[in-house]
Amino acid sequence: MKKRPFLLALLLAPFAAVAQPGVDRPQPRLPTEPLVIVTRDGTRHTFRTEMALSPDQQMVGMMFRSSMEPDEGMLFDWGAPRESSMWMRNTLISLDMVFIRADGRIHRIHERATPLSLATIDSRGPVRATLELQAGAAERFGLRVGDVVEHHIFGTAR
């Protein structure tokens, strides 16, 4: 008889995460910092970026949010170069993902990620950070691999 409560708890464990703060609703807005992307022609595009620094903030990211302004973003600072794998689980809006090397140069851009998709979106090489922007931003602003991101984490801020 003592096995039943243990088995029930074991069976329900995967569903316990649903009730945790941030896993079933958007996280509160994170502190923002300015970030500038300088395209190859010298044009400067400024964004207000929420800083996702802790593992909990990074796990939730843009989940459950219904909108993002054209000049907003979320920067996931990994702290040191590493492979970055993202997904769109519980993410209701399409996003562009910009993978940024430690020197501040754009390494890869994945445009218009599919909302709610569980497919992984990989950096395809070590990056210091991943920037999520409104879907279509990369095309709208003419962002390309090799463009420079100015922000203090890359040592490129002005």
Image (spheres, helix red, strand yellow):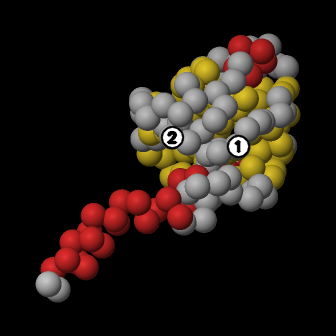
Q: Residue furthest bottom?
A: 2
- Please state if 10 lies on the left or on the right of 88 as rendered: left
Q: Nearer the viewer, residue 116 or 135?
A: 116
The residue wearing badge 2 is 89
- Around disc 1, counting alpha carbons within 10 Å, would you say few (fewer than 14), some (14 to 19), or many (20 or more)? some
Q: Position of residue 44 (x, y in %)?
A: 85, 26
The disc placed on residue 148 is none
- What's the amino acid at mark 2? Arg
Q: Residue at x 61, y 21 (%)?
A: 112
Q: Residue at x 70, y 32 (%)?
A: 133
Q: Is residue 98 visible?
A: no
Q: Nearer the viewer, residue 27 or 128?
A: 27
Q: Position of residue 34 (x, y in %)?
A: 83, 45
Q: Residue at x 66, y 31 (%)?
A: 93
Q: CA distance from mark 2 to mark 1?
A: 12 Å
Dot 2 lies on which element?
Answer: loop
- Please state if 70 lies on the left or on the right of 20 as rendered: right
Query: Is 7 placed above or below 110 here?
Result: below
